[in-house]
Amino acid sequence: MAQKLRVIVMMGGPSSEHDVSMASGAQVFNALKTSSQFEVQAIIIGRDGKWSLSESAPQALPKPGEAQERPMPRAEAIRGISLLSQADAVFLAFHGPFGEDGTLQGMLDSLSIPYTGSGPLASALAMNKAKAKELFRYHGLTTPNDISLTSAAIRASISNAIEVIEANLGYPVVVKPNLGGSSLGVSIAEGVESLREALAWAARFDADVLVEQKILGRELTCAVLEELDGGIRALPVIEIVPHRGAFFDFASKYEDGGSDEICPADLTQDQSQMVQKAAMKAHVALGCRGFSRTDIFLTDEGPVVLETNTIPGMTPNSLLPKAARAAGIPFPELMAHLVALGLRRK
């Protein structure tokens, strides 16, 4: 009888997306446990940075976290790393800084431990929305016009920040932390008062704030999956119709009935192929591995790429699992495939 592979699912972390990560991690853990290939354990990193090894993954509901990140205590991180010593592979179920931004990926590379998803560089680039947009433009992808501002500059003179935005972008605009995900800290500003509030809110989440021209079009997302031979394919496109807010915010993403997610999207074959091609091009431009999911608006002029997620959510309401099911890939099979990709790459 073949020896089982020891897979450790890592989740939690000291970021504002701790609870979303816990919800994703529990789903991944339970899916991998159904396979006879794997011996599965969980490493849970608390909001305080403490690591614990567990034989189970507690069920959690995704909910928005605090704006301020907590630093990882050095002694705790050094102790926690020892918990990885017997891992054959690590499944990263983090979202946000530390687990999705390349930090942990670089550490695992230095320890020669295989892991799921993209490496340090692609992870860091995708997390940094402003840098990702520069790469998208370089590779011929259309992305919204934008301005980057430091949170320090916003706090020093929010009036000056507003003047710069009004002169270069006008209204409406989307204001978001440059780093982060799950739509935390994101707002739409239609005028000066809402812009003032949006800038102050986003500045609480990150050292830099990205302000983008709001795009009018159909809101879509498209996942890309790597094959074992190294090729990639785009999964069916999903159209998102939010109900809880003016855009696909946290409530629309994670609350029951928060949005309609139509999979596959009601597009013509040409439209679907254009969106899938843009998602694959974004995946390659950033150097992503394993899987990714790119958010796109479809306008009369074609696809407009917003951002790429290197660790998309794996909660019951998440979009990558829905797209995979539409492509005939059950969730446990998808999880096992992602582990196999990490092992093959190593």
Image: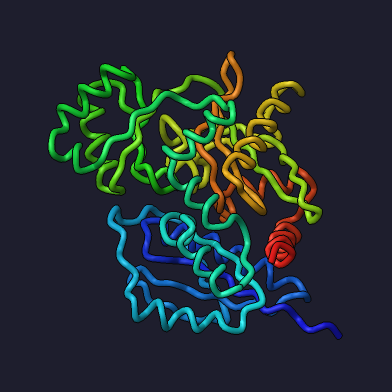
Report the residue at 53% width, 21% height from top. 217
- Residue 51 lies in what quarter of the image? bottom left
- Residue 36 lies in what quarter of the image? bottom right
| In front of the other: 164 or 194 | 164
Across and down, in percent, residue 332 comes to 72, 62
| In front of the other: 284 or 274 | 284
User: Quick check: 121 above or below 46?
Assistant: above
User: Quick check: 258 above or below 53?
Assistant: above
Across and down, in percent, residue 328 comes to 80, 48
Going by the picture, which residue comes out furthest to the right? Answer: 1
Q: How is the image coloured?
A: rainbow
Report the residue at 64% width, 35% height from top. 281
The mark total stands at: 0
Q: Quadrant of the C terminus?
A: bottom right
Kindly tell me whether residue 191 is visible in this rendering.
yes
Kindly tell me whether residue 332 is visible in this rendering.
no
Across and down, in percent, residue 152 comes to 19, 43
Q: Quadrant of the N terminus?
A: bottom right
User: Quick check: 292 above or below 60?
Assistant: above
Q: Is residue 206 shown left or right of residue 259?
A: left
- Residue 283 lies in what quarter of the image? top right
Across and down, in percent, residue 170 comes to 31, 17
Report the residue at 69% width, 33% height from top. 276
Q: Is residue 151 shown left or right of residue 121?
A: left
Going by the picture, which residue comes out furthest to the top? Answer: 300
Report the residue at 25% width, 28% height from top. 195
| In front of the other: 292 or 11 | 292
